[in-house]
Every structure is written in structure tokens, then in C-alpha cells.
């Protein structure tokens, strides 16, 4: 995607930090049909109940249902891996029907209630989303084999002049809180701080202009500009044009 190409160490880090897929199915019911004191339901299957035939086997990988906070009529089903990827490709009508059958078979019998049909169904599709191809990163055997880390992914790309020209953020770049939203947020703060520190490097220069490291860029109406670049200056500033 990048011209010029990313450094080999950066490509190695991207290859070694794996990404998985976790999806949710949200089901909104006309009323709460489960007991008031239940907020989480885990599905434990015996060898007999775990038996399945054909494409419907994906529902047996739903491992938990949760009542959504502040939405007392909404259940959230969690599943991952190949079952989640299969679920994303199902027509909505088929997805609705097979999920209803599964809930009625296990939870309807467990609570001895008649489970109504949901009013609405909403699903996530992280794996098939072309901008993500998965939900979040995790550490795998490839991570150990290539001896890579989130810190390597987080390092900025630096040009020949020692200037950071490409920054990286996101949960996969957090050494402690990868796979989490707060990890993603903290990585954004980290890179914002890096930019702030970069712009603080301005210092007085010759003829009343201003410098950023070794650069002085006078503009008409301004003494100089540091780090505020027009697109036509990118090659002179970065040493080579960057595009993605």
C-alpha cells in the first residue's frame, strides 16, 4: 500500500501480530421473557446436544448470551472464529431463523418458557468488512516465531533527516491493552503527544524566521512556518514522496 515501501521491521511486525474475529448478534424482543435475575447465559452442551448436521452447526459455537446494558429487551450473542465468519455470510432471514431455533432449543427448555420471535436483529461483520478484515489483534505462535511486539508496530517511520513521517496508532500498537477499546484510545493519545513534542521543537532562527530542527521555511506574510506543509513541498520536506 505504501510508496516507498514500509521498512522490513515494520512489515515483519504487521505479519507477526495476528488478528482474529469476534462477532455479535443483537436480538431485540417485544418483552423480557427470561428471568429478571439473569443477565448472562452460558451454553454448555453434552455430547448429545452438541450433535449437529450441515450448515446449522455454526450456532453451536455461540458460547454466551448477554443482556445489553440499558436495553432490557435486547440479548447479545457472542461467537468467534470460523463460525463468526460463516454467520456474516448468511442471508438475514436464515440467520434469524437458525438463531431463534437455537435459543428456543436451549434457553426455552431451560427456563420452561415460550420464546417469542425477535422484533429486530442486528449483526456485526468485522471479518467481511474490507476496512478491517477482523475485530482485534491477539498474540499467536507467529508472534513468538518472528519475535515481534506491539512496540515495533508503534514505532514511527523516520526519514533520512530524522523526522517522523508516518505514525501508527490503534489497539494492536498497545503493549499492554491490545484487543481493547481503551488500548486504542491510549495509543491515539500517545501519537498526539508525539506530534505535540515534534511541534515544540521550533526554535528562533536566522533573520527572524523560525526553524524546526534544521529547516527554515519563510512564507509571504509569515516569518516562517515549521511543520505546516503544502502538498507541493512534501518531496522536499520528507526526502521522498509518501502515498498510501
Image (cartoon, helix red, strand yellow):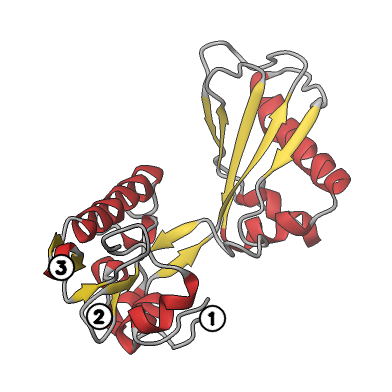
The residue singled out by tag 2 in the image is 147
Location of residue 115 in the rendering, given as x and y in whole percent from the top left corner: 77, 22
Residue plotted at (45% across, 68% down): 230
Q: Earlier in the sequence, mark 2 or mark 3?
A: 2
What is the secondary structure assignment of the residue under circle 3?
A: helix
What is the secondary structure assignment of the residue under circle 2?
A: loop
Residue 14 falls left or right of residue 40: left
Q: Residue extending furthest right?
A: 93
Q: Height in image: 221 above or below 117? A: below
Residue plotted at (70% across, 18% down): 112
Q: Nearer the viewer's eye, disc 1 or disc 2?
A: 1
Location of residue 89 in the rendering, given as x and y in whole percent from the top left corner: 77, 59
Q: Height in image: 229 above or below 43? A: below
Residue plotted at (67% across, 18% down): 73
Q: Nearer the viewer's eye, disc 2 or disc 3?
A: 3
Front residue of this view, candidates 104 and 40: 40
Label 3, residues with CA under 10 Å away: few <14, some 14-19, many ≥20: few
Q: Which mark is residue 1?
A: 1
Amino acid at each position: 500500500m505504501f510508496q516507498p515501501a514500509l521498512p522490513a521491521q515494520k512489515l515483519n511486525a504487521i505479519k507477526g501480530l495476528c488478528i482474529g474475529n469476534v462477532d455479535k448478534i443483537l436480538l431485540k424482543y417485544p418483552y423480557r421473557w427470561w428471568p429478571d435475575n439473569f443477565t448472562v447465559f452460558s451454553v454448555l452442551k453434552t455430547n448429545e446436544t452438541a450433535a449437529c448436521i450441515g450448515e446449522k452447526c455454526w450456532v453451536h459455537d455461540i458460547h454466551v448470551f448477554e443482556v445489553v446494558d440499558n436495553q432490557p429487551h435486547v440479548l447479545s450473542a457472542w461467537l468467534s472464529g470460523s463460525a463468526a465468519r460463516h454467520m456474516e455470510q448468511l442471508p438475514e432471514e436464515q440467520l434469524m431463523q437458525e438463531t431463534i431455533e437455537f435459543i428456543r432449543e436451549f434457553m426455552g427448555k431451560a427456563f420452561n418458557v415460550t420464546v417469542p420471535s425477535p422484533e429486530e436483529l442486528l449483526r456485526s461483520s468485522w471479518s467481511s468488512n474490507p476496512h478491517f478484515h477482523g475485530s482485534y489483534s491477539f498474540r499467536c505462535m507467529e508472534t513468538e516465531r518472528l519475535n515481534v511486539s506491539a512496540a515495533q508496530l508503534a514505532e514511527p517511520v523516520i526519514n533520512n533527516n530524522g523526522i517522523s513521517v508516518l505514525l501508527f496508532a490503534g489497539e494492536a500498537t498497545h503493549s499492554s491493552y491490545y484487543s481493547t477499546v481503551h488500548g486504542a484510545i491510549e495509543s491515539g493519545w500517545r501519537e498526539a503527544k508525539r506530534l505535540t513534542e515534534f511541534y515544540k521543537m521550533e526554535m528562533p532562527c536566522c533573520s527572524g524566521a523560525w526553524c524546526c530542527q534544521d529547516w527554515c521555511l519563510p512564507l509571504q506574510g509569515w516569518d516562517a512556518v515549521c511543520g505546516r506543509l503544502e502538498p507541493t513541498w512534501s518531496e522536499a520536506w520528507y526526502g521522498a514522496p509518501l502515498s498510501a
